[in-house]
Amino acid sequence: MKSTTLRPGLLVSLKTSLRGNVSYAKTVIEAEHKTDDGAEQARWETERRIQNPAEYERAKTVRSKAGSLIRSVCAHSAFGLLCPESKAEELSAAITSAHQLVDEFNRAAEPSRVGVYVITGRVAPDDVEAVKAINSEIRDLLAAMSEGVKNVDVKTIRDAADRAKQLGTIT
Protein backbone atom coordinates (compact mmCIF):
# COMPACT_ATOMS: atom_id res chain seq x y z
CA MET A 1 0.00 0.00 0.00
CA LYS A 2 1.34 3.39 -0.98
CA SER A 3 0.94 6.24 1.52
CA THR A 4 1.21 9.96 0.96
CA THR A 5 2.67 12.36 3.48
CA LEU A 6 0.81 15.64 3.65
CA ARG A 7 2.48 18.95 4.24
CA PRO A 8 0.96 20.82 7.16
CA GLY A 9 -2.10 22.70 6.02
CA LEU A 10 -5.60 23.86 6.79
CA LEU A 11 -9.00 22.33 6.23
CA VAL A 12 -11.29 25.26 5.41
CA SER A 13 -15.05 25.19 5.94
CA LEU A 14 -16.75 28.01 4.02
CA LYS A 15 -20.39 29.05 4.12
CA THR A 16 -21.92 32.05 2.42
CA SER A 17 -25.50 33.20 2.80
CA LEU A 18 -27.95 35.69 1.35
CA ARG A 19 -30.98 36.52 3.47
CA GLY A 20 -33.87 38.89 3.05
CA ASN A 21 -35.31 40.65 -0.01
CA VAL A 22 -36.87 37.42 -1.36
CA SER A 23 -40.07 35.70 -0.31
CA TYR A 24 -41.71 32.55 -1.61
CA ALA A 25 -45.34 31.47 -1.61
CA LYS A 26 -46.20 27.83 -2.33
CA THR A 27 -49.61 26.83 -3.66
CA VAL A 28 -50.42 23.11 -3.64
CA ILE A 29 -52.07 22.20 -6.92
CA GLU A 30 -52.22 18.46 -6.36
CA ALA A 31 -51.59 16.93 -2.92
CA GLU A 32 -49.14 14.06 -2.59
CA HIS A 33 -50.80 10.81 -3.64
CA LYS A 34 -50.00 7.38 -5.04
CA THR A 35 -50.33 6.91 -8.78
CA ASP A 36 -51.69 3.80 -10.51
CA ASP A 37 -48.15 2.45 -10.90
CA GLY A 38 -47.36 2.92 -7.16
CA ALA A 39 -45.22 6.04 -7.46
CA GLU A 40 -45.79 9.08 -5.26
CA GLN A 41 -46.72 12.29 -7.01
CA ALA A 42 -47.51 15.88 -6.04
CA ARG A 43 -47.70 19.20 -7.87
CA TRP A 44 -47.29 22.70 -6.59
CA GLU A 45 -46.57 26.17 -7.83
CA THR A 46 -44.04 28.47 -6.20
CA GLU A 47 -44.19 32.22 -6.51
CA ARG A 48 -41.03 34.21 -5.82
CA ARG A 49 -41.14 37.91 -4.98
CA ILE A 50 -37.97 40.01 -4.93
CA GLN A 51 -38.55 43.31 -3.18
CA ASN A 52 -35.51 45.10 -4.66
CA PRO A 53 -34.26 43.24 -7.77
CA ALA A 54 -31.22 45.48 -8.39
CA GLU A 55 -30.00 45.02 -4.82
CA TYR A 56 -30.67 41.28 -5.00
CA GLU A 57 -28.42 41.01 -8.08
CA ARG A 58 -25.67 42.97 -6.29
CA ALA A 59 -26.07 40.72 -3.24
CA LYS A 60 -25.65 37.58 -5.37
CA THR A 61 -22.53 39.08 -6.96
CA VAL A 62 -21.04 40.02 -3.57
CA ARG A 63 -21.81 36.57 -2.12
CA SER A 64 -20.20 34.86 -5.10
CA LYS A 65 -17.12 37.10 -5.06
CA ALA A 66 -16.61 36.69 -1.29
CA GLY A 67 -16.67 32.90 -1.61
CA SER A 68 -14.45 32.99 -4.68
CA LEU A 69 -11.80 35.08 -2.89
CA ILE A 70 -11.42 32.30 -0.32
CA ARG A 71 -11.81 29.35 -2.70
CA SER A 72 -9.11 30.74 -5.01
CA VAL A 73 -6.46 30.17 -2.33
CA CYS A 74 -7.53 26.59 -1.62
CA ALA A 75 -7.61 23.23 -3.35
CA HIS A 76 -11.08 21.72 -3.68
CA SER A 77 -11.64 18.19 -2.41
CA ALA A 78 -14.58 15.97 -1.51
CA PHE A 79 -13.78 16.78 2.13
CA GLY A 80 -13.90 20.54 1.69
CA LEU A 81 -11.35 23.18 0.88
CA LEU A 82 -7.72 22.41 1.67
CA CYS A 83 -5.08 25.10 1.97
CA PRO A 84 -1.34 24.41 2.22
CA GLU A 85 0.43 25.91 5.24
CA SER A 86 2.51 27.98 2.82
CA LYS A 87 -0.67 29.86 1.81
CA ALA A 88 -1.97 30.49 5.34
CA GLU A 89 -1.25 34.23 5.19
CA GLU A 90 -2.81 34.46 1.73
CA LEU A 91 -5.89 32.65 3.07
CA SER A 92 -6.09 35.04 6.03
CA ALA A 93 -5.91 38.02 3.66
CA ALA A 94 -8.61 36.50 1.43
CA ILE A 95 -10.90 35.96 4.45
CA THR A 96 -10.34 39.57 5.56
CA SER A 97 -11.08 40.85 2.03
CA ALA A 98 -14.24 38.74 1.83
CA HIS A 99 -15.49 40.10 5.17
CA GLN A 100 -14.73 43.67 4.10
CA LEU A 101 -16.60 43.19 0.83
CA VAL A 102 -19.64 41.76 2.63
CA ASP A 103 -19.57 44.42 5.37
CA GLU A 104 -19.41 47.21 2.77
CA PHE A 105 -22.42 45.76 0.94
CA ASN A 106 -24.43 45.23 4.13
CA ARG A 107 -23.86 48.81 5.32
CA ALA A 108 -25.57 50.16 2.17
CA ALA A 109 -28.15 47.40 1.66
CA GLU A 110 -31.74 47.77 2.75
CA PRO A 111 -33.61 44.43 2.69
CA SER A 112 -30.70 42.10 1.78
CA ARG A 113 -27.99 40.69 4.05
CA VAL A 114 -24.97 38.74 2.83
CA GLY A 115 -22.91 36.60 5.20
CA VAL A 116 -19.57 34.84 4.88
CA TYR A 117 -18.47 32.36 7.53
CA VAL A 118 -15.13 30.52 7.66
CA ILE A 119 -13.81 27.91 10.04
CA THR A 120 -10.30 26.54 9.63
CA GLY A 121 -8.75 23.45 11.15
CA ARG A 122 -5.12 22.42 11.02
CA VAL A 123 -4.12 19.20 9.24
CA ALA A 124 -0.89 17.77 10.60
CA PRO A 125 1.29 15.58 8.37
CA ASP A 126 1.02 12.73 10.88
CA ASP A 127 -2.77 12.84 11.05
CA VAL A 128 -3.56 9.26 10.02
CA GLU A 129 -7.26 9.87 9.28
CA ALA A 130 -6.50 12.87 7.05
CA VAL A 131 -3.94 10.84 5.12
CA LYS A 132 -6.43 7.98 4.70
CA ALA A 133 -9.19 10.32 3.56
CA ILE A 134 -7.07 12.15 1.02
CA ASN A 135 -5.54 8.91 -0.26
CA SER A 136 -9.06 7.56 -0.69
CA GLU A 137 -10.05 10.60 -2.71
CA ILE A 138 -6.95 10.28 -4.89
CA ARG A 139 -7.74 6.57 -5.47
CA ASP A 140 -11.31 7.54 -6.49
CA LEU A 141 -9.99 10.18 -8.90
CA LEU A 142 -7.55 7.70 -10.45
CA ALA A 143 -10.39 5.19 -10.83
CA ALA A 144 -12.52 7.87 -12.50
CA MET A 145 -9.66 8.69 -14.89
CA SER A 146 -9.19 4.99 -15.65
CA GLU A 147 -12.92 4.58 -16.33
CA GLY A 148 -12.80 7.68 -18.56
CA VAL A 149 -9.92 6.21 -20.56
CA LYS A 150 -11.76 2.90 -20.91
CA ASN A 151 -14.91 4.71 -22.14
CA VAL A 152 -12.95 7.29 -24.19
CA ASP A 153 -14.65 10.03 -22.14
CA VAL A 154 -12.38 13.07 -22.32
CA LYS A 155 -14.58 15.20 -20.04
CA THR A 156 -14.45 12.62 -17.21
CA ILE A 157 -10.69 12.27 -17.56
CA ARG A 158 -10.16 16.03 -17.59
CA ASP A 159 -12.44 16.66 -14.58
CA ALA A 160 -10.75 13.96 -12.48
CA ALA A 161 -7.28 15.13 -13.52
CA ASP A 162 -8.12 18.74 -12.63
CA ARG A 163 -9.36 17.71 -9.17
CA ALA A 164 -6.28 15.54 -8.64
CA LYS A 165 -4.05 18.46 -9.66
CA GLN A 166 -5.76 20.68 -7.07
CA LEU A 167 -5.20 18.04 -4.41
CA GLY A 168 -1.56 17.87 -5.47
CA THR A 169 -1.01 21.36 -4.08
CA ILE A 170 -1.42 20.02 -0.53
CA THR A 171 0.34 16.65 -0.72
Image (cartoon, helix red, strand yellow):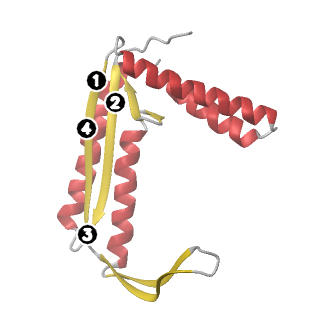
Q: In terms of sequence position, does the residue under pointer 2 or pointer 3 come before the other?
A: 2
Any part of residue 31 in sight: yes
Tell which of 51 and 90 is nearer to you.
51
Q: Name the residue at 69% across, 40% down.
A: 156
Residue 112's label in the rendered image is 3
Q: Quick one: label 3 or label 4, which is nearer the N terminus? A: 3
Residue 58 point in image, percent of width and height: 36, 66
- Disc sitting over residue 119 in the figure: 4
Residue type at mark 3?
Ser
Q: Name the residue under label 1.
A: 122
Q: Which of marks 2 and 3 is in front?
A: 2
Do the numbered discs 3 and 4 sit on residues whose CB atoms are within 8 Å? Answer: no
Residue at point 51%, 21% (across, down): 135
First in sequence: mark 2 vs mark 4: 2
Q: Residue at x 63, y 81 (%)?
A: 36
Q: What element carries label 3?
A: loop
